[in-house]
Amino acid sequence: MIRQAVILCGGLGTRLGSLTHATPKPLLPVGGRPFLEILIGEVVRQGFNDIVLLSGFCSDQVVRLVKESRFIASLKANIRVIVEPVPAGTGGALRYAEDILASEFILMNGDSLFDIPLRLLCLELQRSPALAGVLALREVAQPDRFGVVEVVDGVVQDFADRAPGRSSGLINGGIYAMRRDAVLQLIADICSLERDIFPALVAERRIGARAYDGFFLDIGIPDSYSEAQESIPALIRRPAIFFDRDGVLNVDHGYVGTMERFDWIAGARSAVRSANDAGYLVFVVTNQAGVARGLYPETAVADLFDHMQMELAEIGAHIDDYRYCPHHSDGTIEQYRKACDWRKPAPGMILDLAEQWSVDMSGSVLIGDKQSDLDAAKAAGIDAHYFAGGALDTLVHRLLEISTERGLV
Ligand SMILES: [Mg+2]
């Protein structure tokens, strides 16, 4: 499973004039938040927990954001900032991260948001061992200020840096799934990914490409930066499906704390994938009194979640985030013995997720197999559906159809 995302944050942003004289472009505010904070959230929620920020210009501000952002601190991810001592270009910057690069990773520009299923891009790379990387493409009407890409049978044939005068074309969306060794061997001290590395790999027919039609916005010019102030907050405000875990996503064998005892409910993984595809946030909210009862340690809950993410990644799916309550008033472990407002039927876990993410609660729904699940949803002010067993994807497909009719997504 690819878990590392590398974000290029070193650009000077010269096209934005005075806005970026003393601020790195990725840190410009969008809807009242630093753009980079939004971008990191979009990546982490898709199951990437190792984030590397390649920074140069005004890197102290990037370091400060990572240190001080409450949102970033609340993410279940390790976030590191690598500072290039001299401007080395988009390729050269990667060399400074050489020691910490994973064998496969995704790489993206820190000044644009391309809303694509990152897990599917990762699968494209993993299914094609001969490729050095796979590029996410976007069809645009006026590709002049972007690099146009010619593709035959999913393999890039030509990679033009800028293409003036065209009326439409597939452009480089600025997100790549990459193999470390193939890229690093071509990198010089100062070089550009777009002008040096990719043309060399394209000449060997080792760059794949896949087109996506998701939202795309590059904040690097004044008009689009201005447009971003409304369009990006609107984009990231999504309805959610809150899944109970035991008895909904996995068979409830009673206090499931290990992978050996974890069995997916029929259709559960494809239900998650369908919710991802439909543009819903997918959350898990689960009472884990097994921790308070001393049946398994709290770390087992996170390990099991990690196991679920890995098995979801195999089909290009992900869970955006989760909450669990380890407490119980009858617990045998002192530190977990208490009544807790996160424990369903209380709505604490749902409300905490809603506070962290931009959730359209009016379009959101909880799926549970107990009355306490339904009561928690009611207390949080969202709809709830009882899962009576059978195939979970059947229920989710029905819910998604209903929601589509109501125009929620
Ligand atoms: Mg349950």
Image (cartoon, rainbow, N blue to C red):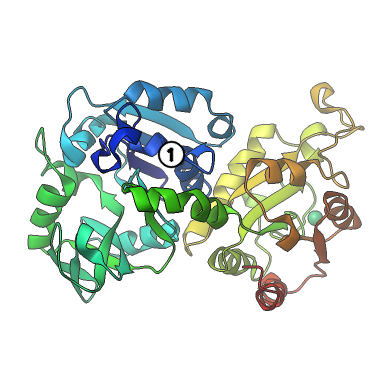
Is residue 104 visible to the viewer in this orientation of the structure? yes
Residue at x-position 52% and y-position 52%: 230
Amino acid on which the number 1 mark rests in the picture: Leu
Q: Position of residue 9 (x, y in %)?
A: 32, 36
Pick the front one: 169 or 343: 169
Residue of label 1: 36
Q: Quadrant of residue 184?
A: top left
Point 91% across, 32% down: residue: 329
Rendered view: 304 above or below 175: above
* Quadrant of the image occupied by residue 28: top left
Q: Where 252 sits versus 273, above or below?
A: above
* Residue at the (79%, 39%) spot, across then down: 290
Residue 301 against residue 47 in the figure, above or below: above
Point out residue 137 in the picture as x, y percentages from the top left corner: 30, 64
User: Is 325 on the left or on the right of 53, as rendered?
Assistant: right
**Which part of the image, by quadrant, shows the C terminus?**
bottom right
Q: Position of residue 211 (x, y in %)?
A: 33, 69
Residue drawn at x 49%, y 43% as measured from the top left: 38
Give x and y (percent) for residue 380. 82, 50
Q: Quadrant of ligand 1?
A: bottom right
Say few, some or many: other residues with alpha carbon within 10 Å of mark 1 (under 14 / 14 to 19 / 20 or more): many
Q: Is mark 1 within 8 Å of ligand 1?
A: no
Q: Nearer the viewer, residue 26 or 328?
A: 26
State left or right for residue 344 relative to residue 278: right
> Helix or strand or loop: what does disc 1 sit on?
helix
Regarding residue 106, the answer to whether it shows in the image is no
- 241 and 315: which one is in front? 241
